Amino acid sequence: MYSFEPSEEQKMLIDAVSRYAVNDLRAAAHDAEEESKLPQSVVSKGWEMGVLQASIPEGYGGFGEHSVVTGVLAAEEMAYGDLAGTLAVMTPGLFVLPILLGGTEEQKQQYIPPVIEADWQPYTAALIEPSFDFDPNELKTTAKADGDDYVLTGEKTYVPFAKDAEAMIVYANLDGATQGFIVPKGADGLAVGEERIKLMSLNALPLYSLKLEGVRVPKANRLGGEAGHDMGPILAANRVALAALAVGVAKAAFEYSRDYAKEREAFGVKIAQKQAIAFMLAEMATEIEAIRLLNWEAAWKLDVGKEDAAKDAYLAATGAVDMVMMVTDRAVQILGGHGYIREHPVEMWMRNGRGFATFTGLAIV
Amino acid sequence: MIEFETPKPIAQQQYVLQTVAENMMRPVSRYFDEHEHEIPWDYINFMHQAMKASGAGSLAPKDEKKEQDPNKPKRPPIGYQLLAHMLEIISWGDVGMYLVTPGGGLGAAAVQAAGSPEQKKKFLARFAGEKPTFAAMCMTEANAGSDTSAIRTTAVLDEKTNEWVLNGEKIFVTAGDKALTEYEQSGKGFIVVWATIDPEAGRAGMRSFVVEAGTPGVKVTKLEHKLGIRCSDTASIVLQDARVPYDHILGSPTVEKTTKGFKGAMATFDATRPLVAATGIGVARAALEEVKKMLAEQGVEIRYGLPRQKLTNVEREVIDMEVMLRSAWLMVIKAVWMADNRKPNALESSMSKVKAGDVVTKITQKAVELMGPLGYTRDTLLEKWFRDAKITDIYEGTGQINRLVVARHILGYRGRDLR
Ligand SMILES: Cc1cc2nc3c(=O)[nH]c(=O)nc-3n(C[C@H](O)[C@H](O)[C@H](O)COP(=O)(O)OP(=O)(O)OC[C@H]3O[C@@H](n4cnc5c(N)ncnc54)[C@H](O)[C@@H]3O)c2cc1C
């Protein structure tokens, strides 16, 4: 059967997340971006919403089961509030969910409960590398087996909360395949940059570059143990997460510019009454809906284990990149000169929008 | 719960129709493109028999009234969803031929939407008869296309004979010829004609009338020569003192101050727009599949999963086409799913039509471009699909008209706020 109706539980979750997104994240977003600082209280409150906890089975300290669709719905809603804040709240998921998806039973037992049962703590993951042709399936960071250890060498960037992280998953190229390795805080040879890196947006999210100079981790720290793990599902879960966040940002920009257009007057009418504006809005709404459905389908396929799920997740993320850029750009256009001024949030959403082509690895559901 | 599993009964139909599309449509697709105004009776007869045998009767959605066993878990209705899938596949075969599928098309849909139970019985029974039978819907006039309120065709009640007397000229009537001309192979059809019963009243005065084939004063005066969908006849029809019985008016015979009657008629579009979108998507899927097949034959593999900047241009284009096609299709599915579940879907209907109109033109254009000399030649069907797909963005409300509908909905505007 087809159905486009979230379950009752999902609706309750969406409702709660939506309130938090507007009342807390959106309220804090402007200053957080300007001052490069998001109050920890906002992050903690987001964590207490329990989105991640609800996607972890009881056996590992959570209170639900992993559902990509639910994760997507929550991510859409939260990013409608603010992207940087959402990424901050979701960061521990970058550590926990790959372990849930690809870890051994021991790894799940050992690593997941301490994160899930506690308050928000900095746990993270490092995937992105500083090169224009960064490709998660062809990493330049290498892992080499050496005795009882793996030795990790390379450079990573865009790693959220790396400086304080209790532990992180570092992705590296092991004989041509991307594999995750659990690296504890303060590992020898792990050099986290002193200064936060600065991007076109996401100022509120502390991001760092790091160098791995022969970092040794025991073989037991390889995600999935001896046999390793399949990177496909992890990347797919990354992609639908990003697409969902893009939908959230786009929806924020669309609604803001729509409401503005109904207020602003030019030539004696509301600008929304001009087709040039109204048609832009109609197309924005249409594109958001299109990508949203594409992403829902991909998420559903991941949940039920359809063969082409990973491909669909890739298509959804690819479509989302264009969609969010188009929508956020038009939102600025609809506000005209006022859209260019940082008092209105649309310019920030436009800066957010351009990042989605680059963010693979920053979110997972 | 959010779900995307194709319902079983639909999957079964898909399988059957795929065979029809491959074996009865594709082999003659080019022939009927090059022989405009020839009629594919083999296909028509086959579809008529097949639909009769399956009890489908026509491609118009039926009232779902079957008594459900209260002991069994309730199955959600899927009539429109089934229809969307069927039209998509037949159009994948050949959309011009789809448009000459017997069963009443838009004419029957109009009766279905606005007719009384007696009228439905009287006018729709014929589609399950011996011979394939056609109906058509006549709204457009030379000076009234998108602006349907500008129609000038009049209907005047002759109180002496209790008949409506219709005068006017309609253009661009899909299947107008087949509905009115009595061919040896076909049954007696009808057209649904939009006219005004009170020219002062504007939209409130607009009504539709069933005009039977053979009515004196009704004449097909022209068949258009078109860019695409050449297998489908597009007729001009003149009505000169054409008399129809009183009870052939669909909806109320009196003019109220409201535009309720008109709006009711427009509501038909909520049902038909996603279906038209589905037909366009069938064409675009045909083109995209052909492109992928031709590329594969040339040894070109699409490397899904690569970052954009590492893809070749051809790969990017194909991936974009897939994103467009699938997302547009899901919008269609959502719109018809809403229709099945009796959720108001005017916004989603028009949105799906906006999106489909855009993507099917883009995809078929790209298909020709990407294949170079192999795309532009009449040796393959790509150039034909490019011509066929374009109509999706024109009829059943142009892309612009559907943007207006979407915009009014999202802005909470009425017609007078945004026109
Ligand atoms: C092959 C074919 C089959 C058809 N079948 C049928 C049929 O079976 N029955 C039937 O009744 N009709 C049928 N039509 C007619 C079709 O629905 C109309 O052609 C269509 O509605 C557009 O009307 P028009 O051609 O007069 O264009 P116009 O209304 O003159 O439009 C011209 C351009 O102006 C734009 N435009 C118009 N109004 C606005 C506005 N308010 N804001 C912005 N832009 C606007 C349009 O989008 C279009 O781009 C058919 C047409 C074709 C080509």
Image (cartoon, coloured by chain):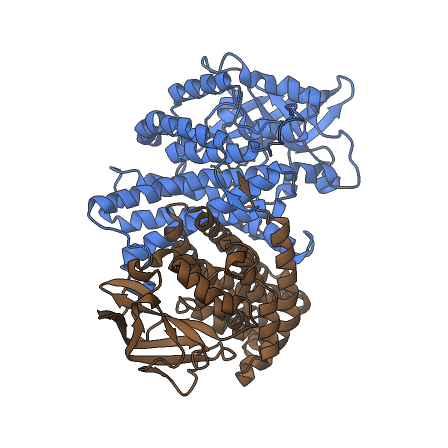
Chain colours: A brown, B blue
- Side of B373 where B131 appears, left or right: right
Q: Nearer the viewer, residue B146 or B279?
A: B279
Q: In terms of image quadrants, where is residue B68?
A: top right
Q: In terms of image quadrants, where is residue A156?
A: bottom left
Q: Nearer the viewer, residue B370 or A119?
A: A119
User: Residue B240 placed where, x, y %?
Assistant: 61, 25
Determine if residue A121 is in view: yes
* Residue at x-position 40% and y-position 39%: B283
User: Residue A141 placed where, x, y %?
Assistant: 28, 72
- Side of A296 where A235 appears, left or right: left
User: Residue A39 placed where, x, y %?
Assistant: 59, 80
Determine if residue A266 is in view: no
Q: Residue furthest left?
A: B298
Q: In terms of image quadrants, where is residue A331?
A: bottom right
Task: Look at the picture and state if B181 lies above or below A210.
Answer: above
User: Residue B324 placed where, x, y %?
Assistant: 42, 51
Q: Residue furthest bottom?
A: A194
Task: Look at the picture and state if A76 lies above or below B27.
Answer: below
* Residue at x-position 58% and y-position 47%: B348
Q: Nearer the viewer, residue B333 or A20?
A: A20
- Side of B174 where A313 appears, left or right: left
* Residue at x-position 48% and y-position 66%: A93
Task: Look at the picture and state if A73 lies above or below A360.
Answer: above
Q: How many marks?
A: 0
